[in-house]
Image: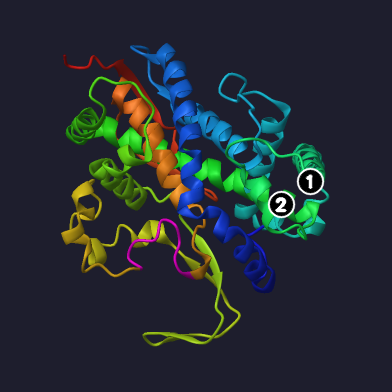
């Protein structure tokens, strides 16, 4: 898909996908964000006044329902049925990819194929591909037969309507990439945000006051206009992504000779950009770089900052195409949760770096029911 395609193929696919991720089109999915956020609030009710639990498991189920519905038009109801063959297969593939990334002897295909993990990976990939292939085939048949549904189109339908020359395999790769990238990264940012607000109660109260000023005692779903007013929550999200950059390492290949100080990087060299380190640099962020301070992202504090000092969505022409989708989904889900519950959490002590950044032992929080004033 788009994330690992070579440059020539990437240019073609990016040109196809970019209009589909236009703000106006993504805003059609706000209703889905709100509906699934409301289901999440109901599911979290069982955790009120109970021992701490890993909220990531709840958030990722919610985001999967959002991504399946917006990408493929499929209502999977993962939130009520989290243990499906598709999800088990998907999680198996991600675990094996993570393992191979950090075990050099597992990276050569010749060696990997000698292990039982190769068979597990193939079976799991075949299962996920079978599911997506079936959806793609049915959507293409509908398009060829002139069958169209009323209302909003999902991303797969938009792809088919804009470029009928895309093969079923290309469509599957795009949808699978969106399903993985749109779920895991967004779910992690939401979970880290809840952790940080559970630690920093003063910031949580400011978020709650902002939400009260927008919604009052109403439990209605957030609209685009509501989310445009969530200035403090947006700063909290940005500060969360700075402190806990969920994609901690970005790989790139130099396209030309680059000089950095006395160092010369020739073209064609693999490079690792490490936002996790850069986002905590005291040179860039001051002596309190390790502290949580959402007001770093007030306009007057951001104005003089170098544009590459903060790159949670990467930077340049290969930046994250779904950043607007992600921000709207995160605001909507957090607005639903934080209007309903007060969160408490302990300081994060340890992490593990895989493809993504995870806390050890997890995103552990406790919940109390909010009682709105008045």
- Rounded to the nearest whole Å, what is the CA distance between mark 1 and mark 2? 7 Å
Residue 355 locus on image (x, y percent): 55, 51
Q: Is residue 197 visible?
A: yes
Horizontal side, residue 261 vs residue 113: left or right? left
Residue at the (62%, 54%) spot, across then down: 101
Please tell me whether the stretch drawn in magenta is mainly helix, strand or loop. loop
Q: Nearer the viewer, residue 179 or 156?
A: 156
Are dots 1 and 2 in contact, CB under 8 Å?
yes
Q: Assess whether residue 257 is covered by the magenta stretch.
A: no
- First in sequence, mark 1 or 2: give its number: 1
- Look at mark 1 in the image and give the residue it sits on: 140
Instruction: Give residue 203's quadrant in the image.
Output: top left
Q: Is residue 316 above or below residue 105?
A: below
Residue 237 locus on image (x, y percent): 33, 45
The structure's colour scheme is rainbow
Find numbered disc 1 in the image and state the secondary structure of the residue it sits on. helix
Instruction: Give residue 38's quadrant in the image.
Output: top left
- Look at mark 2 in the image and give the residue it sits on: 160
Q: Over which residues does the magenta segment extend?
A: 308-316
């Amino acid at each position: 898909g788009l994330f690992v395609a070579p440059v020539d193929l990437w240019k073609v696919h990016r040109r196809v996908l970019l209009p589909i991720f236009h703000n106006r089109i993504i805003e059609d999915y706000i209703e889905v964000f709100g509906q699934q956020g409301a289901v999440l609030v109901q599911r979290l009710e069982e955790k009120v006044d109970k021992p701490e639990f890993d909220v990531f498991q709840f958030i990722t189920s919610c985001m999967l329902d959002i991504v399946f519905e917006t990408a493929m038009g499929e209502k999977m109801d993962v939130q009520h049925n989290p243990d499906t063959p598709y999800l088990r297969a998907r999680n198996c593939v991600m675990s094996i990819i993570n393992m191979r990334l950090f075990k050099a002897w597992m990276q050569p295909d010749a060696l990997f194929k000698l292990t039982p993990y190769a068979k597990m990976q193939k079976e799991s990939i075949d299962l996920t591909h079978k599911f997506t292939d079936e959806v793609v085939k049915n959507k293409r048949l509908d398009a060829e037969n002139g069958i169209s549904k009323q209302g909003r189109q999902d991303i797969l339908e938009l792809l088919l309507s804009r470029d009928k020359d895309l093969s079923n395999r290309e469509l599957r790769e795009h949808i699978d990439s969106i399903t993985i990238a749109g779920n895991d990264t967004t779910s992690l940012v939401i979970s880290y945000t809840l952790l940080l607000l559970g630690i920093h109660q003063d910031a949580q109260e400011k978020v709650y006051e902002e939400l009260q000023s927008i919604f009052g005692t109403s439990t209605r779903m957030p609209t685009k206009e509501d989310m445009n007013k969530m200035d403090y929550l947006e700063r909290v999200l940005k500060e969360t992504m700075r402190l806990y950059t969920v994609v901690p390492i970005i790989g790139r290949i130099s396209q030309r000779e680059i000089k950095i100080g006395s160092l010369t990087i020739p073209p064609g060299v693999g490079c690792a950009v490490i936002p996790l380190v850069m986002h905590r640099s005291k040179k860039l962020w001051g002596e309190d770089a390790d502290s949580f301070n959402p007001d770093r992202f007030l306009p007057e504090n951001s104005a003089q900052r170098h544009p590459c000092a903060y790159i949670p969505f990467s930077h340049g022409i290969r930046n994250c195409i779904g950043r607007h989708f992600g921000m709207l989904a995160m605001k909507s889900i957090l607005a639903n949760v934080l209007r309903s519950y007060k969160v408490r959490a302990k300081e994060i002590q340890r992490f593990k770096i895989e493809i993504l950044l995870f806390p050890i032992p997890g995103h552990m929080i406790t919940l109390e029911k909010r009682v709105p004033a008045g």
